Amino acid sequence: MPRIVDLSAPIRQDAWELPEQLRTDIAYTDHAGGARDIEALTGVTPDLLRDGEGWTVETFTNFGTHSSTHVDAPWHYNSTIGGERAQSIDELPLDWFLRPGVVLDMTAKADGDPVTTAEVEAELARIDHDLREYDIVLMRTGRDAFYDDPGYMALGPGVTAEATRWLYDRGVRVMGIDAWGWDAPLWMQAQEAKERGERGIFWAAHQAGIAYSQIERLFNLDELPPTGFTVACFPLKIVGGSAGPTRAVAILDD
């Protein structure tokens, strides 16, 4: 049997201190509550249930498509790309999301540092890998270690638009990172954009004008070799969605 490495963040109730836009809220119904629901729905009373228990159910009361580990669709970046309507998550080819993976070590990068084309090329040379069409390229930054830190959102380097286009031009359609986002932390982008007063600085790699997908908030990339594994990262089929949560995994034949 192949070995499977879980690359996904846990989905759980977040601290109430987090802003609502970023928080995941889950309502849990226990077995006793399930018994009451069964009685209300069917008339079957708890004494007719084994141990008097009903089903358990969890309900997301606040959960965005970009919460936890997720796959972005081109529709997330812009309404049109290359003069055509950008694709939503349900419109992307499924075969993008089951492909050989490549891990590039960017753990030496400080928060906000740009990941450049030259650095991507140098890392590919170091691991002796020639990119193939549809390889899934994963940037390992080590920021998954801070997932429970209140400042997690503000951590991580940023992949440049140029490096993103360079990967795309070589046939890569899915790229991932173990930080909160693919670009530099939002506050750093915002500061630079306002100081320079220019379009295209904020969210530069997201809005690079290419139809590709990002996997954000990956986990456990340190458990993977640079190559020699398959990534499975199918997003939920949300009609018209800008993203889909995914249970991303790596499959290794070792």
Image (tube, rainbow, N blue to C red):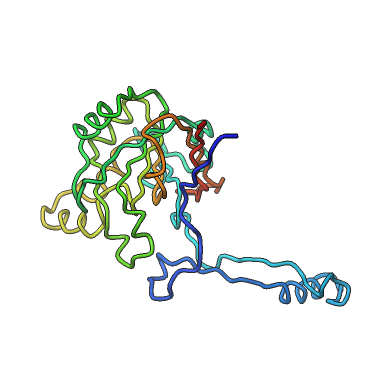
Q: In the figure, is residue 123 to the left or right of 215? A: left
Residue 85 rendering spot, x and y as whole percentages: 42, 38
Residue 210 rendering spot, x and y as whole percentages: 33, 35
Q: In the figure, is residue 131 to the left or right of 96? A: left
Residue 72 rendering spot, x and y as whole percentages: 42, 45
In which quadrant will I find the N terminus?
A: top right
Q: In the figure, is residue 172 to the left or right of 34? A: left
Q: Indicate the quadrant where residue 53 lies.
A: bottom right
- Residue at image position (11%, 57%) is 195
Q: Is residue 238 above or below residue 152?
A: above
- Residue at image position (45%, 69%) is 14
Q: Is residue 226 above or below residue 243?
A: above
- Residue at image position (50%, 34%) is 252
Q: Nearer the viewer, residue 178 or 240?
A: 178
Residue 223 rendering spot, x and y as whole percentages: 41, 43
- Residue at image position (74%, 67%) is 55
Q: How many numbered marks does the figure carry? A: 0
Q: Nearer the viewer, residue 197 or 44?
A: 44
Q: Indicate the quadrant where residue 103 lies.
A: top left
Q: Nearer the viewer, residue 84 or 176?
A: 176
Residue, far right = 48
Residue, far left = 196
